[in-house]
């Protein structure tokens, strides 16, 4: 028997970078919000990722655009948080260590140029060595864009949580959702192990647990955990200026964060000898001078990976009031999720280009087409 | 009055050696850990803490607290209480 | 990849006992220790080629250790010193010698990883010159170095007496010894120990050395503030009540340059936790210890624990538990005959009963009281690696998560090189005191490799060539599942 203890206009499930951002943006629009987590803010993927705000190698090109739009929201959002989250947005590289990798990079760049917003290009070996001292002489080139960057994802998520509280969001950690209450097929409440909350709107931002939450309203979310192992070293003197895919040096402490793997092992968060040695070898190969740095910890995060790799953003057609906000790259897209969901919930629509990401696109009866990346999809400017 | 650790006379040690610490030669003996050489030469602290910049020295002595860090040329940052001194070793502190 | 029947991790009394017993049963044994020589913390060896004219009774431990190590060396055990075990995955241990890494496969694993001394957070405890009693002992006994000129010892229980005696014998000026316990409890304990011989005479010998040197023992005193600018210059101590809380108006100052803290031991359970072994909280045995059954088996099949890592019981018990684990490993591998096994088992079991007899008394003496965890002030550091204060830790615990992981995310406590060895002991007890929740309810952080830091170059150079085939650093279009 549950009794209603709380009421809210919106309940957000999952206090990671995505859930916190959504709660924050909703609170800014004046909504009363409860943010629930079965553990605590940043306890899952948001506290176990690489920390990139990454744009240029996201494919297809319209997903890159979405990432770019989100990346451009970061400076003003971080300014509102008024805390140092070590945000740097000066550019980023993906190194190419042989001709084949370089050719693949070139092909990727040309695909991305379908977007008029894209500012990336290939760098020659000399340009890489000039831009990023410390990279191995064996490098052949790199893909680069000035729109990439990094931050401290834990500091960011927790700063968001503090900002949420300042704006009146009630954050309930150590609270597990046990059910979603529906009335006439519409959301009317959330059941937890600490009592229930009456609300007409639920946002499922539960990351790898999102399918479990969606099951509660009879919806199947095709999201699988994809494990990424990472290493972190002791602090070191400043060497790298720009983050790279798989190697970055943190702004404040100068520690190297190294990654990563892509493994489909369910909810297994263990690190492995094979994974760790592979990451170490990759790092030493690409930035030889890190070889004497000591690894102090390895960990693994679980990326919530939707079936086609693209985010799930929107309201479930068959369960009005139930919104989905799930995908990998929750850090890069955190500001965008916040704006998009608060637009949808407060105004019923958004100008942000989220059409390709409807959560019902995989449903057989759904009228929403699944994007395969080959269609021409209008960009923000072209849309009516 | 700052106390200086002192080598116990009743011990017979291995052959003498030189450790070059921040460019200065220190006397040590084969078998001594770097921390012993440092302390016997009057250094009780050779590092600053990460945020507050406090002076730090040996605490646990058994290699689990990582306070006694020094940089040994060619080996990176190591615990002084776990590394044996050798003749001509070049060491930097305040790492 | 190399394989062996029994791997023993840790070359102290427990590890030596385990290796010997398993080798005696005819098994292929590998003994691994991260230090350059065997003996662990208990059998502190002086460096090769050194000698010292120490007094006889202090030498006994050294001779015992020497004898045991020599036996192990003769027994055909494969010994890997200067080798760190940094990860465990099923039946594979990941090891390193700092220049490469490789895996050692085991049939049976015996964890004999020992313990370290517990830290005490009080104002000024991070000043150079403050160290554990064991650190002072390692310097004096193992390196022939007096840690300072004017030394104050602060602790609880008999181990401190040994450290004090060794310091005095070596010519150190010990200004005073602070003992948190009261005289009545101590005398009562001493009287209970008399029928068991051995330890009580040792303690009296230490006391005699201390008294002869004119060192005063201040009972029911705790240090409450360590003073100095960049180095220890003095200590303010206070008389305490039975809960170790300072009695107002009973402060006393000491002019010293070195402080040795000796309040007890913390089992080293990183590898056991990484292996998935069940832990249990036993405050009388050091806090979180590796659970084990009467055969030294942990909750993970094929993994045993012996010695302090399974609960602080002293070196004598550790050695016997090691033997027991070695014997059981042999039995499980089917190499013992029933009669020999039962005889040997009986022998060890009886020896253990005898060795454990003093424990209840010792544990009574060594019991920590709440006042020890109330010494920290708002600004006192708790995490030394990341400079995190008591104030920030308690605030995070109160608001977000009374657990180590949450505190870590909010404050960075535990993110440094020592990976929470020091603060991970303190934080649950400080939270318990401040929030009034039992220590065992405070969840620990996820155990993660490497057990201790190792260079990237080593990690990048696995000796196992089978792995190179999985290193194909395949590029994928981000977002696409493999095969699509």
Image (cartoon, coloured by chain):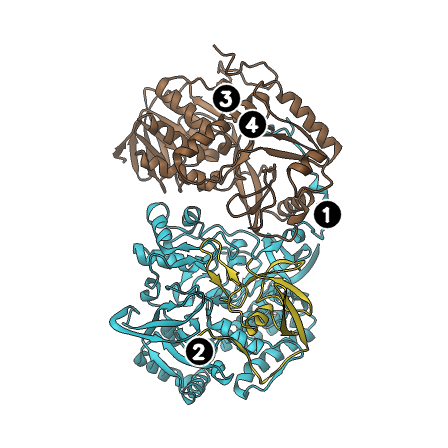
Chain colours: A brown, B yellow, C cyan
Q: Is residue A183 left or right of residue C126?
A: left
As measured in the structure, the alpha-carbon distance from the residue carrying label 2 to the one carrying label 4 is 66 Å
Instruction: Tell me the mark number nearer the camera, choosing from 2 and 1.
Output: 2
* Residue C202 versus residue C426 in the image, above or below: below
Helix, strand or loop under label 4 = loop
Numbered disc 2: secondary structure: strand
Quadrant housing residue C15: bottom right
In the rendered image, residue A68, in percent from the top left (x then y), is placed at 53, 26
Distance, label 4 to label 3, CA atoms, is: 10 Å
Q: Which residue is mark 3?
A: A357
Q: Which mark is residue C258?
A: none
Q: CA distance from mark 1 to mark 4?
A: 31 Å
Q: Is residue A88 visible to the viewer in this orientation of the structure?
A: yes
For marks 1 and 3, give the one nearer the viewer.
3
Q: Where on the picture, by quarter, is residue A309? A: top right
Drawn side of residue C384 relative to residue C435, left or right? right
Q: Which residue is mark 1?
A: C466
Q: Secondary structure at mark 1?
A: helix
Viewer-side residue, C374 vs A274: C374
Q: Which mark is residue C150?
A: 2
């Amino acid at each position: 028997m549950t009794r209603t203890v709380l009421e809210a206009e919106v309940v957000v499930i999952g206090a990671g970078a995505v859930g916190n951002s959504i709660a924050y943006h909703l609170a800014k629009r004046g909504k009363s919000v409860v943010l629930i987590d079965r553990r605590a803010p940043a306890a899952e993927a948001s506290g176990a990722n690489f920390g990139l705000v990454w744009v240029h190698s996201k494919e297809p090109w319209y997903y890159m655009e979405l990432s770019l739009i989100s990346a451009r929201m970061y400076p003003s959002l971080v300014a509102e948080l008024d805390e140092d989250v070590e945000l740097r947005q000066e550019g980023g590289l993906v190194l190419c260590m042989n001709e084949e990798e370089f050719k693949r990079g070139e092909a990727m760049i040309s695909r991305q140029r379908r977007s008029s917003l894209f500012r990336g290009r290939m760098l020659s070996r000399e340009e890489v060595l000039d831009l990023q001292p410390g990279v191995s002489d064996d490098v052949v080139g790199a893909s680069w864009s000035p729109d990439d960057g990094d931050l401290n994802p834990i500091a960011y998520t927790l700063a968001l949580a503090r900002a949420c509280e300042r704006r009146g969001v009630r954050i309930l950690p150590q609270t597990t959702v046990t059910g979603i209450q529906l009335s006439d097929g519409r959301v009317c409440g959330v059941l937890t192990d600490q009592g229930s909350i009456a609300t007409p709107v639920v946002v499922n931002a539960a990351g790898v647990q999102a399918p479990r939450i969606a099951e509660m309203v009879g919806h199947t979310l095709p999201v699988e955990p994809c494990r990424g192992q990472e290493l972190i070293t002791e602090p070191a003197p400043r060497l790298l200026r720009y983050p790279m895919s798989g190697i970055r040096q943190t702004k404040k402490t100068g520690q190297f964060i190294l990654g990563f793997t892509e493994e489909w092992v369910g909810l297994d968060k263990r690190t492995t000898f094979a994974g760790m040695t592979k990451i170490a070898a990759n790092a030493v190969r690409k930035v030889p001078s890190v070889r004497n740095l000591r690894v102090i910890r390895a960990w693994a995060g679980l990326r919530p990976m939707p079936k086609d790799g693209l985010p799930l953003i929107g309201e479930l057609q068959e369960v009005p009031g139930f919104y989905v906000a799930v995908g990998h790259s929750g850090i890069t897209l955190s500001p965008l999720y916040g704006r998009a969901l608060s637009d949808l919930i407060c105004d019923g629509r958004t100008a942000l280009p989220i059409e390709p990401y409807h959560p019902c696109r995989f449903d057989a009866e759904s009228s929403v087409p699944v994007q395969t990346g080959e269609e021409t999809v209008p960009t923000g400017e072209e849309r009516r | 009055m700052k106390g200086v650790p002192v080598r116990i006379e009743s011990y017979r040690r291995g052959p003498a050696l030189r450790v070059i610490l921040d460019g200065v030669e220190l006397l040590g003996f084969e078998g001594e850990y770097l921390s012993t050489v440092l302390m016997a030469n009057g250094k009780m602290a050779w590092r600053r803490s990460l945020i507050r910049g406090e002076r730090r020295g040996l605490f646990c002595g058994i290699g689990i607290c990582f306070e006694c860090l020094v940089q040994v040329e060619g080996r990176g940052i190591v615990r002084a209480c776990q590394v044996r001194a050798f003749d001509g070793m070049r060491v930097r502190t305040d790492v | 990849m190399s394989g062996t029947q029994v791997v023993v991790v840790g070359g102290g009394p427990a590890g030596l006992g385990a290796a010997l017993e398993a080798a005696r049963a005819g098994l292929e044994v590998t003994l691994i220790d991260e230090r350059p020589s065997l003996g662990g913390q208990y059998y502190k060896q002086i460096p090769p080629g050194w000698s010292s004219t120490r007094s006889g009774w202090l030498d006994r431990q050294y001779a015992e250790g020497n004898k045991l190590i020599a036996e192990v060396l003769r027994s055909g055990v494969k010994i890997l010193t200067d080798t760190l075990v940094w990860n465990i995955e099923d039946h594979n241990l990941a090891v390193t010698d700092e220049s490469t890494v490789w895996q050692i496969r085991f049939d049976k694993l015996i964890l004999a990883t020992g313990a370290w001394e517990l830290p005490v957070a009080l104002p000024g405890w991070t000043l150079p010159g403050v160290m554990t009693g064991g650190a002072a002992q390692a310097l004096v006994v193992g390196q022939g170095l007096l840690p300072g000129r004017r030394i104050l010892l602060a602790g609880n229980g008999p181990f401190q007496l040994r450290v004090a005696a060794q310091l005095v014998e070596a010519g150190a000026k010990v200004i005073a010894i602070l003992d948190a316990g009261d005289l009545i409890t101590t005398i009562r304990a001493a009287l209970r120990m008399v029928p068991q011989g051995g330890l009580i005479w040792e303690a009296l010998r230490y006391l005699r050395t201390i008294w002869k040197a004119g060192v005063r023992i201040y009972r029911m005193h705790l240090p409450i503030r360590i003073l100095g600018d960049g180095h220890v210059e003095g200590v303010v101590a206070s008389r305490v009540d039975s809960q170790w809380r300072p009695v107002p108006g009973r402060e006393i100052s000491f002019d010293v340059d070195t402080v040795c803290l000796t309040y007890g031991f913390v089992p080293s359970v990183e590898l056991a936790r990484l292996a998935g072994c069940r832990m249990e909280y036993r405050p009388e045995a050091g806090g979180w210890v590796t659970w084990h059954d009467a055969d030294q088996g942990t909750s993970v099949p094929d993994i045993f624990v012996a010695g302090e890592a399974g609960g602080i019981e002293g070196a004598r018990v550790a050695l016997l538990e090691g033997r027991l684990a070695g014997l059981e490993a042999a039995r499980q591998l089917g190499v013992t005959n029933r009669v020999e096994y039962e005889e040997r088992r009986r022998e060890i079991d009886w020896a253990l009963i005898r060795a454990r007899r003093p424990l209840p008394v010792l544990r009574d003496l060594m019991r920590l009281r709440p006042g020890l965890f109330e010494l920290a002030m708002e600004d006192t550091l708790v995490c030394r690696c990341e400079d995190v204060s008591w104030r920030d830790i308690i605030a995070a615990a109160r608001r977000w998560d009374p657990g180590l992981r949450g505190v870590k995310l909010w404050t960075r406590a535990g993110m440094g090189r020592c990976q929470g060895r020091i603060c991970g002991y303190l934080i649950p007890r400080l939270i318990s005191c401040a929030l009034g929740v039992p220590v065992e309810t405070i969840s620990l952080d996820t155990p993660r490799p490497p057990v201790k830091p190792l260079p990237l170059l080593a990690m990048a150079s696995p000796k196992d060539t089978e792995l190179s085939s999985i290193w194909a650093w395949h590029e994928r279009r981000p977002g696409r599942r493999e095969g699509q």
